[in-house]
Structure formats: C-alpha cells, structure tokens
Amino acid sequence: MTAPTFDNSYARLGAGFFARTPPVPVADPGPIAVNGELATRLGLDPEWLKSPAGVAALAGNLVPPGADPIAQAYAGHQFGGLSPQLGDGRAVLLGEVVAPDGARFDIQLKGSGPTPFSRRGDGRAWLGPVLREYLVSEFMHAAGVPTTRALAAVTTGEQVVRESPLPGAVLTRVASSHIRVGTFEFFAIRGDNERLQALTDHVIARHYPDAGDAMGMLRAVVSRQAETVAHWMALGFVHGVMNTDNMAVSGETIDYGPCAFMDAYHPDTVFSSIDRGGRYAWSEQPRVAVWNLAQLASCLIPIMGDEQTAVAEATEIVHGFPELYQAAWLRRFAAKLGLAAPEPSDRALVERLLDLMAAQKADFTRVFRGLATGDAAAEFADPAPFEAWRADWQARDPDCALALRVNPVRIPRNHRIQQVIEAGVHGDFEPFAALGEALRLPFEDRPEWADLSLPPREGEEVRVTFCGT
Ligand code: AMP
Ligand code: MG
C-alpha cells in the first residue's frame, strides 16, 4: 500500500493566493465510500485510501506527507452582487497529484473545518450535500460532462448544527483545478496586477497551454463554458448557484450545492430555495454564463496591453459565446433526436418538441430516451400533438443507436437523492451505494434498475433544494 505523492503548484504561487490551514480533525472518522475507479485514474492506491491511515487522511485527521493544506482565496459575484472576499471557508486543498498520464489534479477536502475565510460559518458540511455532490458529480462524469469528481466520502462522528443537528461528513473533491472566475476577481478588485498575471500564467500552463496570453486564455475559457453549459441543458440540469465563485475556469462543473435535474420539463425550472427571482433557472443558464464571462474579461483588461484595443477584443470574445453555445446546443439536442449531422432547420424541430413537453409537463429524461425505444408517446397526457411531431421527426431518418448513446435511461432524480440522504442520516449507506452504481452506467438499460428511471410518484416530488451551508 502506498500513500499519495503530491506536487503543489498552486501553493508555489506564494503569499496572497491562499492561507496555509490544516484541516481540523474530527471526532470519529468512518468510511462511506472510496471511488476506486477514480483513485486508479489518478494513480492513487485505493487500498491505502480504504486503510485506517487513508480514512484518517480523508477526514482531515492526518495530513499525508507531501500535502500542503491551504484555503484558496477568491471573491465572487453572488446573485449579481460583489463579495470581495469569499475563499475556501469549509474546504482545504490538500495538494495536487499528477496522474500516470501526466494530468494534474487538486485533492480537496470539503467540510474540513474552519479556515481564515470561514466568516461566520463552521467550516463543516452535513451528510446531505456530501452525498448529493458525490452522486451528481459522478453521474455527470459518467454522462460525459466536464466536472469535478468525488474521490471519497467519510463520516465525522460529529454533529453539525443547521436548522437541527445533523451528522457531519467530509467529501474529497477532485478537480483539474479549483481556480474560479472569482479567483481572478479577487486580485482584480485589489488592483494586484502582478498576482493577476501570475494567476493567468498558472492557468495557461495548467489548462490552456496553447492560449499564449490572457486574451487567448479568455477565448479558451469562453469556448469551454459554451460546451459545458450546452451539456447541462441537454441533461435537464439546473446548476442552481451560478455565482462567479462557482464557475471554474477549467470549464468543469463545480459546486453541486442546490443543483437538481428536472423531472417534468419546464424552461423556468428553479430548485434552489434562495433563488427567488429565478436568476439561475434552467433556461437562464447560458445568459448567466455570458454575464460571468464578462466579469472574467473585465478582470483581465489591466493585463491585456492597450486598454482600448483590449476592451474591444475581449468584448468581441465574450459576445462570441452565443454562437458557440448555439452550435453546441444544436449538436447535443440533434444527437438526442438521433441526428448526427444537424441541419439549421433541426433547431425548430427540437424547439417544437420542447414546447410540447412544457405544455404537457412531460418528463424530460423519459421523453428523450423514449424516442428511440418507441415509448415517448406514453409520456404525454394528450399524445396527438406529439404524434404529429413524430411524423416530421421520422422524416429526418433518425439514427436510434445514436439517440440511445446520448439519452440517459436514468439521472440522479431529486426524490432518489432525498431517499439516499434519509437512509444515510440513519446510518444506512446501502441505498447510496446502489444508486451510485446505477448512475455509473447511465445509458445502460437493466431490469434491476427499472425503478430508478421512474419519475417521482405523487408526494415523492422534491421541488426545493438548499445550499450546503
Ligand atoms: P457556496 O454558496 O457553497 O458556493 O459558498 C459560498 C461561500 O461561503 C464560500 O466562500 C464558502 O467557503 C462559504 N461557506 C459555505 N458554507 C460554509 C460553512 N459551513 N462554513 C464556512 N464557510 C462556508
Ligand atoms: Mg462555492
């Protein structure tokens, strides 16, 4: 058994980027899950992670040799308002590991205790958000969406107090980096151009080696985000809290706090209890991405040379998002209809279907999956308009094998996650393990998992989600 080896490039950026903060030990660490497949991909030894030393490390009770725990500094626009100092308030970056293929990954403990950025928070996480993030981020990965991942979850043997006392847990999150739009904002609003440049150079070296300079990096980030958001849309995913501190510059989906997938389709769907204005509704996500990317662009202006030219060019790049996004959207939704080579008119075909689904509150996942299996009509209370649509769709000669490859049979439905959390609170992690296993193969239809593709029954539906705090 071997412990991980670390190489901490972010910590080498030096003072001002983070606060050195060890995780705060917990009373009684207990394993919930170790993601063996991810461990192997990272070049880590799953057996070590499962050993008493590994579980202690995953709970923050033991800092493995070579780790250099830090809380990263960042700022962020939250629901449109600037918070000049956020930072890791309930997480520490243990360090970075370099996988056998040379790819570099952050290993972060989330729920690891207070840091200098905790403000009034306790630095802890309760079991609910830890299980939700584990399941949803691993599903996103299985579905091909760029995302942070979950390496492990442990219980702490401690209670955290929210509205009531709840069992505490720690998630080990893996990301190609945790650098956010808000990380750039942190230095930009302080006028710290030197660190802004150092951060930019770090991001270019780490994520966009061909980008060259800040302008090239902005172009690359815009293009990655367009792909990621189009991917969310095609799965009916509502991120829920697209603040600039929750948008990673790598393009990976990050921060699974109040996120959820739609059951019945409606473009205005919102789950988060704090998103009262629907700022982060499903259909708003591409617009919010542009808004966030505009914040990134304005941060970078001071290090882009001549200001007037920089503003013009950066604006053009950000304004290029809709075109990139629309192309990605059409590619993904056309594929969902089994159309590998979309024509411009296919956009209207997709939109007609979505309108029918919204009008009849049809289940997003089941309708798209049902197209190729012939079961879609059953999802409509009045199938007649759908049948008319289907005739036009059939005329496009769809490839059903393609549709089956891109439309999941099952998603992490909110009511299922809720059931998993309720069992977990009572110390039963069987449902968590079972759902996690089924979500690893989202495109595979198996009779033993039939239940998991059903929409919530009356009374089971979960319409509101909460941030992890
Ligand atoms: P989020 O809304 O989850 O993206 O978090 C926004 C900010 O609040 C980040 O700076 C977090 O580190 C901080 N935060 C959230 N929950 C806690 C907590 N329980 N204790 C300390 N800080 C927290
Ligand atoms: Mg966050």
Image: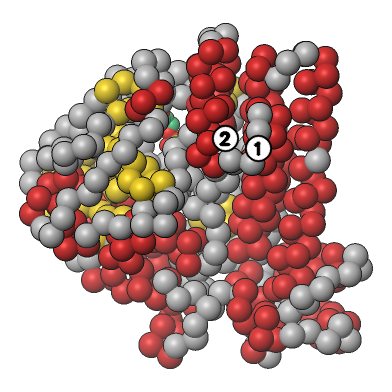
The spot of residue 382 in percent (x, y) is 75, 81
Q: Mark 1 — residue?
A: 211
Q: In which quarter of the image is residue 450?
A: bottom left
Question: In percent of the image, x 57 and y 35: which residue is there?
Answer: 204
Q: Mark 2 — residue?
A: 204
Question: In percent of the image, x 22 and y 62: which residue is there?
Answer: 46
Q: Which of 234 and 402 is in front in this view?
A: 402
The spot of residue 288 in percent (x, y) is 67, 39
**Callouts 1 and 2 close, C-beta under 8 Å:** yes
The spot of residue 386 in percent (x, y) is 79, 80
Amino acid type, residue under disc 2 in the picture: Ile
Under tag 1, what secondary structure?
Answer: loop
Badge number at residue 343: none
Quarter of the image where ligand 1 sits:
top left
Q: Quadrant of residue 362?
A: bottom right
Q: Is residue 49 left or right of residue 110?
A: left
The answer to whether residue 128 of the structure is visible from this angle is no
Q: Which colour scheme is used?
A: secondary structure
Looking at mark 1, is its residue's CB closer than 8 Å to ligand 2? no
Q: Is residue 335 left or right of residue 207?
A: right
Q: Is residue 345 above or below residue 163?
A: below
Q: Please report whichever mark, 1 or 2, sits nearer to the chain's N-terminal start.
A: 2
Q: Is residue 123 left or right of residue 394?
A: left
| Extreme-right residue of the structure | 345
Q: Give the total of numbered labels.
A: 2
Please tell me how crowded label 2 is: few (under 14), some (14-19), or many (20+) other residues with Cα within 10 Å.
many
Cα separation, mark 1 vs mark 2, equals: 6 Å
Looking at mark 2, is its residue's CB closer than 8 Å to ligand 2? no
The spot of residue 440 in percent (x, y) is 42, 71
Amino acid type, residue under disc 1 in the picture: Ala
